[in-house]
Structures are given as C-alpha cells and as structure tokens.
Amino acid sequence: MIYCFIILAVLLADKAVKHAVSSGMLPGESIPVIDGVFHITYVQNRGAAFSIMEGQWAVLIALPCAALTAGIILILLKRKKWHRLLLTAVAFICGGGLGNLIDRITEGYVVDMFDFRIFPVFNIADIFICVGCGLLLLYVLFFERSGEKHGHGEA
C-alpha cells in the first residue's frame, strides 16, 4: 500500500508545481534563481523528455500508458520476493509517468520549468522518472543478480 501512496505523492507534487508555474507565468517567461545558472522557465513541451519526438502524440500517449499499466500490475500483483528498492523504483516511475501523461492527454503538452541553462528544461515528474530508473539500475546491478533475499516490502 505504501507504494500507492508514493505514486500519489509524486503525482500531487508534480501537479502542484506545474499549476504554480502555469498559473503564475507566461509561456517562455524565465525567472532567474541563480542568474545564468538556474532559472524557473515556463516551457510547454509537446515532445517527450527534453522535447524529443515532438508531434508524435500517438506514441507519446501509447508508450507511457503501456509502461504505467505494467508498473501498476507489478505493484498490484506484488509478491514477497520483490525487493523494496524495485517497488520504490516502479512507484517513482509510475508517479512521474502518470503526471506527464495526464498533462499530455488534458493539455496536449507537458509543463516544464527547471532550467539549468546547459541542459533541457524539465519538471518534477522527469526527476522522479530518472531517479526511479537509477534505482531500477541499482536493483538490477546489486540485488537481482546476487539473489538478494532481504529488503522485501509490503504494498
């Protein structure tokens, strides 16, 4: 059950920040936090992560739906043998993916805002998707292959 709360917390944090940016700024507007290093910039991203695949709306909706479905099934069918790190990774990826998917379906774009000037603008959902992928990689590298039996969690 805790993993469902993680998904919800990620989704709510993502939606709150996106709402604050989209209701308080104009598209393209940028507010320097650390001038020249970090800005809050309102971007309407019509592509995937970092604006790739812009205009490919069918793929941009179908792939996240499939990934979210697989993740939710994994959590709902969780067995004791599944490691907490794996379930946390899936919850982070699902929460972030759901946040961006809802935007894409309802608005036709995803609101991005974190702008480090030397990297594409991104949002809270992107952070959790990337962290979730990192946790998944750690799980595969250190627990999946070693046959780790500890760290099992409850859903």
Image (cartoon, rainbow, N blue to C red):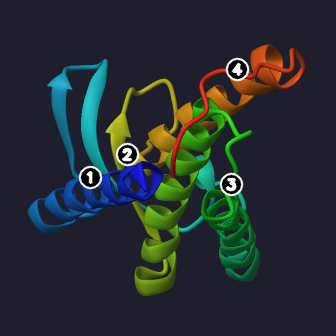
Left or right of 94 in this view: 73: right
| Amino acid carrying mark 1 in the image | Ala
Q: Are marks 3 and 1 in contact (CB under 8 Å)?
A: no
- Circle 4 packing at 10 Å, graded few (<14), some (14-19), many (20+), is some
Q: Residue at x 60, y 24 (%)?
A: 151
Q: Position of residue 92 (x, y in %)?
A: 51, 45
Q: Earlier in the sequence, mark 3 or mark 1?
A: 1
- Circle 2 packing at 10 Å, graded few (<14), some (14-19), many (20+), is many
Instruction: Look at mark 4 in the image and give the residue it sits on.
Output: 138
Q: Are marks 3 and 4 in contact (CB under 8 Å)?
A: no
Relative height, residue 94 to residue 116 (above, below): below
Q: How many marks?
A: 4
- Residue 43 visible somewhere in the drawing: yes
- Circle 1 packing at 10 Å, graded few (<14), some (14-19), many (20+), is some
Q: Earlier in the sequence, mark 2 or mark 4?
A: 2
* Quarter holding residue 36: top left
Q: Residue at x 73, y 75 (%)?
A: 56
Q: Nearer the viewer, mark 3 or mark 1?
A: 1
Q: CA distance from mark 3 to mark 4?
A: 26 Å
| Local secondary structure at mark 1 | helix
| Local secondary structure at mark 4 | helix
| Local secondary structure at mark 3 | loop
| Amino acid carrying mark 3 in the image | Ile
Q: Nearer the viewer, mark 3 or mark 2?
A: 2
| Amino acid carrying mark 4 in the image | Leu
Instruction: Look at mark 2 in the image and give the residue it sits on.
Output: 124
Instruction: Look at mark 1 in the image and give the residue it sits on.
Output: 13
State the mark number for residue 146.
none
Q: Residue at x 31, y 18 (%)?
A: 37
- Circle 3 packing at 10 Å, graded few (<14), some (14-19), many (20+), is few
